[in-house]
Each structure stands twice: as C-alpha cells, then as structure tokens.
Image: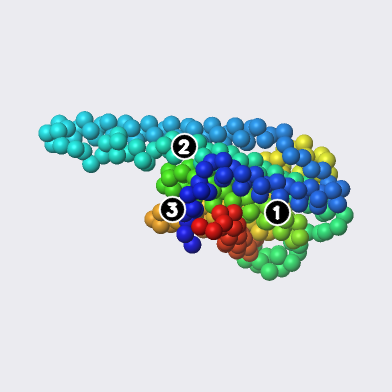
Amino acid sequence: MNSALPQKSLTPLRGLAIIALLHVAFALLTWAFAAAAGSPFVLWFSDTPLLLGAVLTLLLLMGIVWDGTLVSLGLVTETLWKRIRNGRAPPLSVEKLHEKRFFTCGPGPIVLLLATSLAILGTSNITLLNLELLGSTTRWRDPLFWEIEGALLQRIAGISIDTASWDRLYHSAWGIELIAAFALVVIGRGSRIVLRYCVTMILLFYLGRLLGVLNPVMGPGFFRPDVFAYLEGSVTAEAMRVVAQVMASRPEDALHSGGILLGGVSAMPSLHVAMVAVTAYWLSRAARWTLFFTVPWVLLVWASTVVLGWHYVVDGAGGLALAAVSVVLAVRLLNIADGPA
C-alpha cells in the first residue's frame, strides 16, 4: 500500500473534516445504540479538556526539545567544522537540519492528533453501553477463555515475575504512543501519513469496543484474582481495583468517573496491543528501519498484558487482527474520500 495521499487531501482543513465526519458517524451510531439500550451518552466528558491539554502540551514540549536540539547540533557542527576544515561546508548545518524539525511540518499534524484524541475519548460511550447490557442482557465470556488458557496462565504465575518492570512497560504505553505519534510526524513529514494513522486509530477504537459489546471478556486478573495474587502491592493491582469498581457501577454512576477511566471494559480484542501494532505499521511505512524498535515493543506490550492479568493471550492475537483490518479499512476509506486521482 502506498502511504502517500494525493496532494488535495493533505491540507489540515481537509484532514480535519475527514476525521470529524468519521467521528460524527460513529457517534451517531453509538447514540442510537445507547438510546435503544437506555444507557447514557455524552459528547463531552468532564476530563476531555484534561486529555486535550495534556496531548497538546506534550506535543509542543517534545517539539521544542527536538527542534532546539537540532538547531544546537547544527550551530555546534557549523562552528567546529569551520575551524577544522577551513570554512568548508559542514555535513550538518542549521539549514540542512531544517527539514527534520517538528514545527516545520506546520500545525496540521497537531490539529489531526488532537481531533483523533477527542474522537477516541468518545468511544467511552460504548463502555457505558457495555455496562448497561452487562447488567441485563449479556454475560462475561471468561469461563470459556479460561478453559482454553487457564493452564498456561497458571504456569506463568508460577514463574518469578518482576511486576514493577512489567508495570512500567504496560502503563507507559500511552506515553510511548504519543512519542511514537510525534516520531511519525517528524519522519513522515507532515499530514500525509499522520492522517492515515489517525483514521486507523479511530476505526480501531470504535470497532474494537463495539466488538467488546458483542463478546464481553473481563480479563484473567479479574476472573481469577487468586492466580494473580503476585500482583498484590503493584500499580496494576491498584488499577484493577479502580477498574473493578467502574465495572460494578451503574452506567449513570460510572459516567462521573470521566472518559479516560472509562477506557474499556471488555478485554477482547486487546486495544493495548492493537494500538501499538497500528503505530508500528505506520511508522514502518514512513521508515522501514523503525521496525527494529517497534516489533520488540509490540511483543513486549503483548507479553505485559498477559503477565499482569489484563488480557488472555488470544486477546492480543485479536488485537493484531483488528489492527490489520483497521489499516485496510482506513486506506480504502481515504482512497474513496480522495476520489479519482
């Protein structure tokens, strides 16, 4: 697949319009389901400003640090090279590094990433829908998944596990995700590939959470906490207690927890694994050498979800499949939006 979009689709306004239309379409679908089930639906969660502010602040800070480092490197290289090589042009200079800077990509990528964050947070309405249905219509599927993987998970539990290291890996996924998105902007140079990444992520989270409604899976750590007793005292153990409280709440009460905490109820497919897999894919489309870093990242994140009891092994496989489907759908959708070349 060609990662470049036709020139007419590269303007920030056009990219923002595509993301907005996609979000509105999914939001209307979610609202219709919520109305039919009698679950609450909101367009703006109490912590929405917090999320958007954090994403914007971190992107700007990374941009300032990255661009400042490149400018400093260029200045130092120019100065040293002139002294050593009698004024000959240096291999690195402020001008040559200009095209590698973040802010030279323009505001488009930042706008697209903020709009995508807002759209993804909107999928928390599907969590409220799931809670409503679990209270009356559907049941957890964990007994089936445990029957398949229980022996393996019990064997893993018998191994000496450094939960602190796995905690850091698992809970840093969102921070690393934002760093990876920043890298995609810098390497991919602007809005072209970022738009495909953003559309893929929106499809991923809406489709993944809708699948979770059809196939609600609690997760092994919730289903058999006795097997995962080694997590006691860890960050994961405390996080699971908070999530368990949300899962046991009425949707109207869970709504007050905010959209970020309502990240998801069902473990199948694993959006944690799917998210990093999608990011790894689009980074590889921008620069194939990134696979040396992203493939181990994806595998380690997948392993962390199992070791910490958040997911069954098959949840991660489902996440990879969902990531692949989301990429294909995103490319086809954007090709349709572009029209004839």
Q: Secondary structure at mark 3?
A: helix
The residue pinned by badge 3 equals: 286
Residue bearing mark 1: 209
Q: Earlier in the sequence, mark 3 or mark 2?
A: 2
Q: Nearer the viewer, residue 213 or 166?
A: 213
User: What residue is rendered at 34% in x and 37% in y?
Assistant: 98
Q: Is residue 68 visible?
A: yes
Amino acid under disc 1: Arg
- 321 vs 42, left or right, is left
Q: Residues within 10 Å of mark 2 (few under 14, many from 20)?
A: few
> How many discs appear?
3
Q: Give the SS element for disc 2.
A: loop
Q: Amino acid at mark 2?
A: Gly
Q: Give the residue drawn at x 77%, y 40%.
A: 42
Which residue is tagged 2? 106
The picture places residue 327, in percent across and down from the top left corner, at 57, 58
Q: Residue 99 got which mark?
A: none
Q: CA distance from mark 2 to mark 1?
A: 33 Å
Residue kind at label 3, given as amino acid type:
Ala
Badge 1: few (under 14), some or many (20 or more) residues near its Cα, within 10 Å? many
Residue 106 image offset from top left, x and y in percent: 46, 37
Seen at 45% across and 56% down, the residue is: 285
At 54% across and 52% down in the image, what residue appears? Answer: 196
Residue 334 in sight in this render: no
Q: Toward the viewer: 75 or 300?
A: 75
Which of pointers 3 and 1 indicates the residue nearer the eye? 3
Decide which of tag 2 and tag 1 comes sooner along the chain: 2
Q: Nearer the viewer, residue 14 or 171?
A: 14
- Seen in the image, is 42 located left or right of residue 290? right
